[in-house]
Image: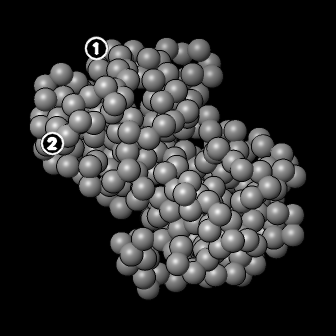
Amino acid sequence: MKHLLKMLDLSAQEITGILNLADQLKYEKKHGIAHPRLAGKTLGMIFQKASTRTRVSFEAGMYQLGGLPIFLSASDMQIGRGEPVQDTARVLSRYLDGIMIRTYAQKEVENLAEYGSIPIINGLTDFSHPCQVLADLMTVREYKGQLDGLKMCFIGDGNNMLNSLTVGGLKMGMKVSAACPEGYEPAKEVLDFASGNPDFFLTHQPREAIGGADVVVTDVWASLGMESEKKEREKAFAGYQVNAENLALAAGDAVVLHCLPAHRGEEITEEVFEAHAAEIFEEAENRLHAQKAVLVTLLGE
Protein backbone atom coordinates (compact mmCIF):
# COMPACT_ATOMS: atom_id res chain seq x y z
CA MET A 1 0.00 0.00 0.00
CA LYS A 2 1.68 3.17 -1.23
CA HIS A 3 -1.20 5.68 -1.11
CA LEU A 4 -4.76 6.03 0.20
CA LEU A 5 -6.66 7.45 -2.76
CA LYS A 6 -9.99 5.57 -2.69
CA MET A 7 -11.52 2.46 -1.13
CA LEU A 8 -11.52 0.72 -4.52
CA ASP A 9 -7.72 0.51 -4.29
CA LEU A 10 -7.65 -1.36 -0.97
CA SER A 11 -7.88 -5.10 -0.39
CA ALA A 12 -9.83 -6.59 2.52
CA GLN A 13 -6.48 -7.56 4.05
CA GLU A 14 -5.21 -3.98 3.86
CA ILE A 15 -8.42 -2.61 5.39
CA THR A 16 -8.21 -5.15 8.22
CA GLY A 17 -4.58 -4.24 8.86
CA ILE A 18 -5.45 -0.54 9.15
CA LEU A 19 -8.37 -1.26 11.48
CA ASN A 20 -6.27 -3.51 13.72
CA LEU A 21 -3.53 -0.89 13.95
CA ALA A 22 -6.12 1.80 14.66
CA ASP A 23 -7.47 -0.28 17.55
CA GLN A 24 -3.96 -0.63 18.94
CA LEU A 25 -3.16 3.09 18.63
CA LYS A 26 -6.48 3.98 20.27
CA TYR A 27 -5.69 1.66 23.19
CA GLU A 28 -2.25 3.20 23.60
CA LYS A 29 -3.69 6.73 23.48
CA LYS A 30 -6.34 5.89 26.09
CA HIS A 31 -3.70 4.38 28.40
CA GLY A 32 -1.14 7.15 28.07
CA ILE A 33 1.34 5.03 26.11
CA ALA A 34 3.39 7.28 23.85
CA HIS A 35 3.82 6.11 20.26
CA PRO A 36 6.19 8.49 18.42
CA ARG A 37 6.34 6.21 15.39
CA LEU A 38 6.71 9.09 12.93
CA ALA A 39 9.38 11.12 14.76
CA GLY A 40 11.20 13.31 12.26
CA LYS A 41 8.50 12.90 9.59
CA THR A 42 6.60 15.83 8.06
CA LEU A 43 3.06 15.77 6.63
CA GLY A 44 1.81 18.51 4.30
CA MET A 45 -1.95 19.06 4.54
CA ILE A 46 -3.51 20.77 1.51
CA PHE A 47 -7.02 22.13 2.02
CA GLN A 48 -9.09 23.32 -0.92
CA LYS A 49 -12.29 22.52 1.01
CA ALA A 50 -13.01 23.83 4.51
CA SER A 51 -12.78 21.35 7.36
CA THR A 52 -13.13 20.87 11.10
CA ARG A 53 -12.64 17.16 11.77
CA THR A 54 -10.18 16.47 8.97
CA ARG A 55 -7.78 19.26 9.87
CA VAL A 56 -7.86 18.79 13.64
CA SER A 57 -7.68 14.99 13.53
CA PHE A 58 -4.77 14.88 11.07
CA GLU A 59 -2.90 17.68 12.81
CA ALA A 60 -3.37 16.19 16.29
CA GLY A 61 -2.69 12.67 15.01
CA MET A 62 0.58 13.60 13.35
CA TYR A 63 1.68 15.44 16.50
CA GLN A 64 0.79 12.43 18.69
CA LEU A 65 2.89 10.23 16.39
CA GLY A 66 5.89 12.50 16.92
CA GLY A 67 5.77 14.10 13.48
CA LEU A 68 5.19 17.61 12.18
CA PRO A 69 1.96 18.56 10.37
CA ILE A 70 2.06 21.61 8.07
CA PHE A 71 -1.23 23.27 7.10
CA LEU A 72 -1.24 24.39 3.46
CA SER A 73 -4.20 26.47 2.37
CA ALA A 74 -4.80 26.39 -1.38
CA SER A 75 -5.25 30.18 -1.30
CA ASP A 76 -1.69 30.54 0.01
CA MET A 77 -0.12 28.18 -2.52
CA GLN A 78 0.81 28.43 -6.17
CA ILE A 79 -1.52 25.45 -6.78
CA GLY A 80 -4.37 27.86 -6.02
CA ARG A 81 -3.06 30.29 -8.64
CA GLY A 82 -2.68 27.93 -11.55
CA GLU A 83 0.54 25.99 -10.94
CA PRO A 84 0.08 22.53 -12.52
CA VAL A 85 -0.55 19.85 -9.90
CA GLN A 86 2.23 17.73 -11.40
CA ASP A 87 4.75 20.48 -10.59
CA THR A 88 3.39 20.93 -7.08
CA ALA A 89 3.64 17.18 -6.50
CA ARG A 90 7.28 17.01 -7.55
CA VAL A 91 8.30 20.04 -5.50
CA LEU A 92 6.52 19.00 -2.31
CA SER A 93 7.91 15.48 -2.63
CA ARG A 94 11.36 16.98 -2.05
CA TYR A 95 10.29 18.70 1.19
CA LEU A 96 7.76 16.38 2.81
CA ASP A 97 7.31 12.72 3.75
CA GLY A 98 3.62 12.63 2.84
CA ILE A 99 0.70 14.74 1.66
CA MET A 100 -2.92 14.74 2.78
CA ILE A 101 -5.24 16.65 0.45
CA ARG A 102 -8.90 17.62 0.88
CA THR A 103 -10.23 18.87 -2.44
CA TYR A 104 -12.99 18.61 -5.03
CA ALA A 105 -11.81 16.52 -7.97
CA GLN A 106 -10.61 12.93 -7.47
CA LYS A 107 -8.32 13.47 -10.48
CA GLU A 108 -6.31 16.00 -8.49
CA VAL A 109 -5.52 13.40 -5.82
CA GLU A 110 -4.67 10.81 -8.46
CA ASN A 111 -2.34 13.28 -10.21
CA LEU A 112 -0.48 14.05 -6.99
CA ALA A 113 0.14 10.33 -6.56
CA GLU A 114 1.17 9.89 -10.21
CA TYR A 115 3.69 12.72 -10.32
CA GLY A 116 4.90 12.81 -6.72
CA SER A 117 7.24 10.34 -5.05
CA ILE A 118 5.73 10.33 -1.54
CA PRO A 119 2.52 8.82 -0.10
CA ILE A 120 -0.70 10.71 -0.87
CA ILE A 121 -3.75 10.51 1.42
CA ASN A 122 -7.22 11.47 0.23
CA GLY A 123 -8.77 13.57 3.02
CA LEU A 124 -11.96 13.93 0.94
CA THR A 125 -12.95 14.44 -2.68
CA ASP A 126 -16.33 14.65 -4.37
CA PHE A 127 -15.91 10.97 -5.32
CA SER A 128 -14.36 9.37 -2.26
CA HIS A 129 -13.95 9.75 1.51
CA PRO A 130 -11.79 6.77 2.53
CA CYS A 131 -10.60 8.16 5.88
CA GLN A 132 -14.17 8.59 7.09
CA VAL A 133 -15.21 5.12 5.97
CA LEU A 134 -12.24 3.51 7.71
CA ALA A 135 -13.38 5.29 10.89
CA ASP A 136 -16.94 4.07 10.28
CA LEU A 137 -15.84 0.47 9.85
CA MET A 138 -13.71 0.77 12.99
CA THR A 139 -16.74 2.05 14.92
CA VAL A 140 -19.00 -0.75 13.68
CA ARG A 141 -16.40 -3.34 14.73
CA GLU A 142 -16.22 -1.78 18.18
CA TYR A 143 -19.98 -1.90 18.67
CA LYS A 144 -20.74 -5.17 16.90
CA GLY A 145 -17.51 -7.13 17.29
CA GLN A 146 -17.37 -7.94 13.56
CA LEU A 147 -18.15 -6.68 10.07
CA ASP A 148 -18.67 -9.88 8.09
CA GLY A 149 -22.34 -10.70 7.59
CA LEU A 150 -23.73 -7.46 9.04
CA LYS A 151 -26.26 -5.43 7.06
CA MET A 152 -25.38 -1.76 6.57
CA CYS A 153 -28.01 0.62 5.20
CA PHE A 154 -27.37 4.10 3.84
CA ILE A 155 -30.22 6.56 3.32
CA GLY A 156 -29.59 9.75 1.37
CA ASP A 157 -27.35 11.12 -1.36
CA GLY A 158 -25.22 8.79 -3.49
CA ASN A 159 -22.21 10.95 -2.66
CA ASN A 160 -18.59 10.32 -1.69
CA MET A 161 -19.75 8.67 1.55
CA LEU A 162 -22.03 6.15 -0.12
CA ASN A 163 -19.43 5.51 -2.82
CA SER A 164 -16.82 4.65 -0.19
CA LEU A 165 -19.16 2.82 2.21
CA THR A 166 -20.44 0.58 -0.56
CA VAL A 167 -16.95 -0.49 -1.57
CA GLY A 168 -15.58 -0.77 1.96
CA GLY A 169 -18.60 -2.63 3.28
CA LEU A 170 -18.72 -5.16 0.44
CA LYS A 171 -14.96 -5.78 0.61
CA MET A 172 -15.33 -6.56 4.32
CA GLY A 173 -18.15 -9.04 3.78
CA MET A 174 -21.04 -6.79 4.77
CA LYS A 175 -24.43 -6.61 3.10
CA VAL A 176 -24.92 -3.07 1.81
CA SER A 177 -28.32 -1.56 1.00
CA ALA A 178 -28.87 2.02 -0.09
CA ALA A 179 -31.88 4.25 -0.69
CA CYS A 180 -31.34 7.31 -2.90
CA PRO A 181 -33.74 9.50 -4.89
CA GLU A 182 -33.72 9.06 -8.66
CA GLY A 183 -30.80 10.93 -10.16
CA TYR A 184 -28.78 10.84 -6.94
CA GLU A 185 -27.40 7.29 -7.13
CA PRO A 186 -23.74 6.35 -6.45
CA ALA A 187 -21.04 6.85 -9.08
CA LYS A 188 -20.98 4.50 -12.09
CA GLU A 189 -17.54 3.20 -11.08
CA VAL A 190 -18.99 2.08 -7.75
CA LEU A 191 -22.12 0.58 -9.29
CA ASP A 192 -19.91 -1.34 -11.72
CA PHE A 193 -17.89 -2.66 -8.76
CA ALA A 194 -21.06 -3.76 -6.93
CA SER A 195 -22.81 -5.10 -10.03
CA GLY A 196 -23.79 -8.74 -9.68
CA ASN A 197 -22.94 -8.87 -5.98
CA PRO A 198 -25.94 -10.37 -4.15
CA ASP A 199 -24.94 -8.45 -1.02
CA PHE A 200 -25.64 -5.08 -2.67
CA PHE A 201 -29.14 -3.64 -2.95
CA LEU A 202 -30.05 -0.20 -4.33
CA THR A 203 -33.57 1.20 -4.14
CA HIS A 204 -35.47 4.49 -4.22
CA GLN A 205 -37.51 3.46 -1.14
CA PRO A 206 -35.90 3.98 2.30
CA ARG A 207 -38.23 1.49 3.96
CA GLU A 208 -37.10 -1.23 1.53
CA ALA A 209 -33.43 -0.57 2.31
CA ILE A 210 -33.52 -0.30 6.08
CA GLY A 211 -35.33 -3.53 6.95
CA GLY A 212 -33.28 -5.57 9.44
CA ALA A 213 -30.23 -3.31 9.15
CA ASP A 214 -27.55 -3.66 11.83
CA VAL A 215 -26.00 -0.32 10.88
CA VAL A 216 -27.84 2.75 9.56
CA VAL A 217 -25.83 5.58 8.01
CA THR A 218 -26.83 8.95 6.62
CA ASP A 219 -25.19 12.20 5.50
CA VAL A 220 -26.21 15.74 4.62
CA TRP A 221 -28.44 16.20 1.58
CA ALA A 222 -26.24 18.95 0.12
CA SER A 223 -22.50 18.47 0.59
CA LEU A 224 -19.94 21.26 0.76
CA GLY A 225 -19.89 23.09 -2.56
CA MET A 226 -23.51 22.19 -3.39
CA GLU A 227 -25.15 25.03 -1.48
CA SER A 228 -26.74 26.40 -4.67
CA GLU A 229 -28.69 23.12 -5.00
CA LYS A 230 -30.03 23.21 -1.43
CA LYS A 231 -33.69 24.02 -2.23
CA GLU A 232 -33.81 21.54 -5.12
CA ARG A 233 -32.27 18.83 -2.96
CA GLU A 234 -34.64 19.47 -0.06
CA LYS A 235 -37.51 18.60 -2.40
CA ALA A 236 -35.76 15.54 -3.88
CA PHE A 237 -34.80 14.14 -0.47
CA ALA A 238 -38.12 14.62 1.29
CA GLY A 239 -38.81 11.25 2.94
CA TYR A 240 -35.14 10.23 2.92
CA GLN A 241 -34.74 10.85 6.62
CA VAL A 242 -33.47 8.62 9.41
CA ASN A 243 -36.34 8.97 11.87
CA ALA A 244 -38.03 6.82 14.49
CA GLU A 245 -40.53 5.43 11.96
CA ASN A 246 -37.85 4.22 9.53
CA LEU A 247 -35.48 3.11 12.28
CA ALA A 248 -38.20 0.88 13.75
CA LEU A 249 -37.72 -1.36 10.69
CA ALA A 250 -34.00 -1.87 11.42
CA ALA A 251 -32.61 -4.35 13.93
CA GLY A 252 -33.51 -3.48 17.50
CA ASP A 253 -29.86 -2.88 18.40
CA ALA A 254 -28.96 -1.02 15.21
CA VAL A 255 -26.03 1.38 15.31
CA VAL A 256 -26.65 4.80 13.73
CA LEU A 257 -23.74 6.70 12.18
CA HIS A 258 -23.34 10.18 10.69
CA CYS A 259 -20.02 11.63 9.50
CA LEU A 260 -21.04 15.16 10.63
CA PRO A 261 -21.85 17.95 10.47
CA ALA A 262 -25.50 16.94 10.86
CA HIS A 263 -28.50 18.99 9.81
CA ARG A 264 -30.99 17.88 12.43
CA GLY A 265 -34.52 17.86 11.11
CA GLU A 266 -33.33 17.16 7.56
CA GLU A 267 -31.45 13.88 6.99
CA ILE A 268 -31.83 12.82 10.65
CA THR A 269 -34.22 13.84 13.40
CA GLU A 270 -33.07 15.42 16.64
CA GLU A 271 -34.59 12.46 18.51
CA VAL A 272 -32.66 9.79 16.62
CA PHE A 273 -29.42 11.79 16.62
CA GLU A 274 -29.45 12.24 20.39
CA ALA A 275 -30.47 8.63 21.03
CA HIS A 276 -27.41 7.51 19.06
CA ALA A 277 -25.04 10.34 19.97
CA ALA A 278 -22.65 7.89 21.68
CA GLU A 279 -22.02 6.02 18.43
CA ILE A 280 -21.88 9.17 16.30
CA PHE A 281 -19.26 10.90 18.45
CA GLU A 282 -17.25 7.69 18.87
CA GLU A 283 -17.25 7.59 15.07
CA ALA A 284 -15.97 11.19 15.02
CA GLU A 285 -13.19 10.32 17.47
CA ASN A 286 -12.24 7.28 15.44
CA ARG A 287 -11.26 9.55 12.56
CA LEU A 288 -8.21 10.36 14.69
CA HIS A 289 -7.25 6.75 15.33
CA ALA A 290 -8.00 5.42 11.84
CA GLN A 291 -6.02 8.22 10.21
CA LYS A 292 -3.08 7.66 12.57
CA ALA A 293 -3.10 4.04 11.44
CA VAL A 294 -3.03 5.19 7.81
CA LEU A 295 -0.16 7.58 8.55
CA VAL A 296 1.89 4.88 10.28
CA THR A 297 1.17 2.41 7.47
CA LEU A 298 2.24 4.83 4.75
CA LEU A 299 4.93 6.96 6.41
CA GLY A 300 6.37 4.54 8.98
CA GLU A 301 9.63 2.67 8.56
Q: Which of marks 2 and 1 is in front?
A: 2
Which residue corresponds to the image point at 62% horizontal and 19% vertical from the top-left? 31
Residue 162 drawn above or below residue 197: above
Quarter holding residue 85: top left
Task: Give left or right: position of 153 versus 272.
Answer: left
Residue 231 is marked as none
The residue nearer to you, when weighing 112 against 199, is 112
Residue 268 location (% of width, % of height)? 76, 57
Residue 84 is marked as 2
* Element at label 1: loop
Q: What residue type is labelled 1?
A: Gly
Residue 259 location (% of width, % of height)? 61, 48
Q: What residue type is labelled 2?
A: Pro
* Badge 1 density bin: few <14, some 14–19, many ≥20, Cα 10 Å: few
Quarter holding residue 121: top left
Query: Which residue bears the numbered disc 1?
Result: 40
Which residue corresponds to the image point at 50% horizontal and 62% vertical from the top-left? 159
Residue 195 location (% of width, % of height)? 42, 82
* Badge 2 density bin: few <14, some 14–19, many ≥20, Cα 10 Å: few
Of labels 2 and 1, earlier in sequence is: 1
Residue 290 drawn above or below residue 36: below
